[in-house]
């Protein structure tokens, strides 16, 4: 019979104990990033993975690539158009409006899978995970610093090298319109040289032409007007101030050609890129979106946010050997004796920083020790018939050759376990 395969661009993740394994890295990343978010007193928000398709058309934008050709949308049994979320911001704002919380400030985080029907390649999947932050209700100023501080904390925590935070400011709506008009005027004589994709962008959302991957268009754009000439001095001061205040912690570059692929942005925008990532070099992106809440039917709620692409981020980190001590618990009494299992249970409650791996198979001691060594365990605790009878256990160090193997009473085993 034909085997059923997973869908293109959707990964099965399985932690096989190998430290280079994506699953192991994601698990570690999610835990660390969650801790960083909590240290900024952000509150978690979980929204459904399915939403009304119109939510994304009205927020991310009907002209954006995400809505135009990447959205996973279909009709449900009631013929209602629903979509797998391609990002988290729109859902967060929808939820805040629905809960009538759009008059107050919020500092929120979320983590979870997103879906975009993109052409899969290294660092680009159809199902991928994001960890995001949204700070709602506070106008431009302090939140921009808080956001860059969070990004710097994450980059520093993982000791990432070779990465840059690019920042830009899209100005007011009026600034943006004047710049777009200037760009359209500038590109008019070059229309014949633009490819189909860039021509379409020029028509629907001219700013996005700046994001072109076409070399010829990139050359033409070298002489194009810069947004710097259209934004207010307060916007330029903000960019300079962020760069001056954080550049001793992270590499920050003002990039006046940085535009983001989602329509809801206004004002400050940013992206973090790494030269270690290849074509998909952006592992994090965000910006201010002051008009989104009102556009979705809520109050005026000035907001800023960002999301990290966890699979791309995972490419940048290396896991160290055993982050916590691993102890292998080997009962060699044939089937695991309930009494031995009870001892293992007690041990776990004594030291939460240790992983206790109870070997459940009834293989030989030799085979169990081989497995413990393969798993890189620090100690083996061995309980056989003799030990059960005498109420003792053997502690066998597996890594430190200078430490001796000991036979101890169960009480002493408990004390030893607490002290590891
Ligand atoms: P975004 O730039 O579309 O922004 O996505 C954020 C990050 O998600 C990217 O920098 C990238 O690392 C990762 N990512 C995007 N698409 C894929 C893919 N197909 N495969 C793997 N990783 C991917 C947003 O999603 C905004 N919601 C961020 C935001 C929050 N802005 C304000 N608040």
Image (cartoon, rainbow, N blue to C red):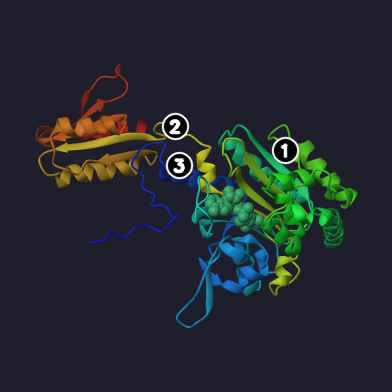
**Dot 1, how many residues are within 10 Å of its Cα: few (below 14), some (14-19), or many (20+)?**
many
Residue for badge 3: 25
Vertically, is 60 above or below 393? below
Q: Residue 222 location in percent, x, y?
A: 80, 43
Q: Quadrant of residue 383?
A: top left
Whether tag 3 and tag 2 are in contact, CB under 8 A, the answer is no
Task: Depth check: give the residue in front, 376 or 270.
Answer: 270
Quickly name the residue at label 2. 320
Sequence-first disc among 1 and 3 = 3
Sort mark 2 into few (<14), some (14-19) or many (20+) by Cα contacts within 10 Å.
few
Residue 10 horizontal side relative to residue 389, left or right: right
Q: Is residue 30 above or below residue 5?
A: above
Q: Disc 1 designates what residue?
A: 252
**Residue 355 shows in this picture:** yes
* Residue drawn at x 76%, y 55% as measured from the top left: 192
- In the rendered structure, the answer to whether residue 180 lies left or right of residue 106 reads right
Q: Position of residue 201 (x, y in %)?
A: 71, 59
- Nearer to me, 319 or 394: 319
């Amino acid at each position: 019979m034909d085997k059923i395969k997973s869908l293109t661009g959707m990964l099965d993740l399985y932690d096989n104990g190998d430290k280079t394994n994506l699953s192991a890295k994601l698990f570690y990343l999610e835990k660390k990033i969650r801790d960083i978010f909590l240290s900024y007193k952000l509150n978690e928000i979980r929204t459904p993975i399915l939403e009304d398709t119109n939510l994304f058309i009205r927020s991310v934008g009907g002209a954006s690539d995400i809505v135009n050709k990447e959205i996973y949308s279909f009709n449900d049994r009631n013929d209602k158009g629903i979509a797998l979320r391609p990002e988290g911001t729109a859902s967060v704002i929808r939820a805040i409006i629905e809960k009538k919380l759009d008059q107050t400030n919020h500092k929120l985080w979320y983590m979870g899978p997103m879906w975009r029907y993109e052409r899969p390649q290294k660092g680009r999947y159809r199902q991928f995970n994001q960890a995001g932050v949204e700070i709602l209700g506070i106008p431009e100023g302090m939140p921009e610093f808080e956001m860059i501080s969070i990004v710097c904390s994450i980059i520093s925590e993982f000791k990432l090298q070779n990465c840059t935070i690019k920042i830009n400011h899209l100005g007011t709506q009026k600034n943006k319109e004047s710049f777009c008009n200037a760009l359209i005027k500038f590109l008019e004589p070059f229309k014949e040289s633009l490819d189909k994709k860039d021509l379409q962008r020029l028509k629907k959302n001219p700013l996005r032409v700046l994001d072109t991957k076409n070399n010829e268009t990139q050359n033409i754009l070298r002489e194009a007007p810069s947004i710097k000439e259209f934004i207010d001095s307060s916007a330029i001061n903000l960019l300079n101030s962020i760069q001056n205040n954080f550049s001793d912690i992270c590499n920050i570059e003002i990039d006046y050609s940085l535009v983001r692929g989602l329509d809801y942005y206004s004002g400050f925008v940013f992206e973090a890129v790494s030269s270690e990532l290849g074509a998909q070099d952006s592992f994090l992106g965000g910006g201010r979106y002051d008009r989104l809440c009102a556009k979705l039917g809520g109050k005026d709620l000035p907001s800023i946010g960002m999301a990290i692409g966890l699979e791309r981020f995972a490419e940048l980190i290396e896991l160290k050997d055993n982050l916590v001590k691993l102890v292998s618990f080997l009962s060699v009494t044939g089937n695991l004796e309930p009494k031995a299992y009870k001892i293992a249970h007690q041990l776990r409650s004594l030291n939460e920083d240790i992983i206790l791996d109870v070997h459940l198979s009834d293989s030989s001691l030799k085979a169990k020790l081989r497995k413990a060594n393969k798993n890189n365990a620090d100690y083996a605790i061995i309980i056989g018939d003799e030990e059960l009878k005498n109420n003792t256990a053997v502690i066998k160090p597996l890594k430190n050759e200078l430490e001796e193997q000991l036979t101890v009473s169960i009480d002493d085993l408990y004390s030893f376990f607490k002290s590891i």
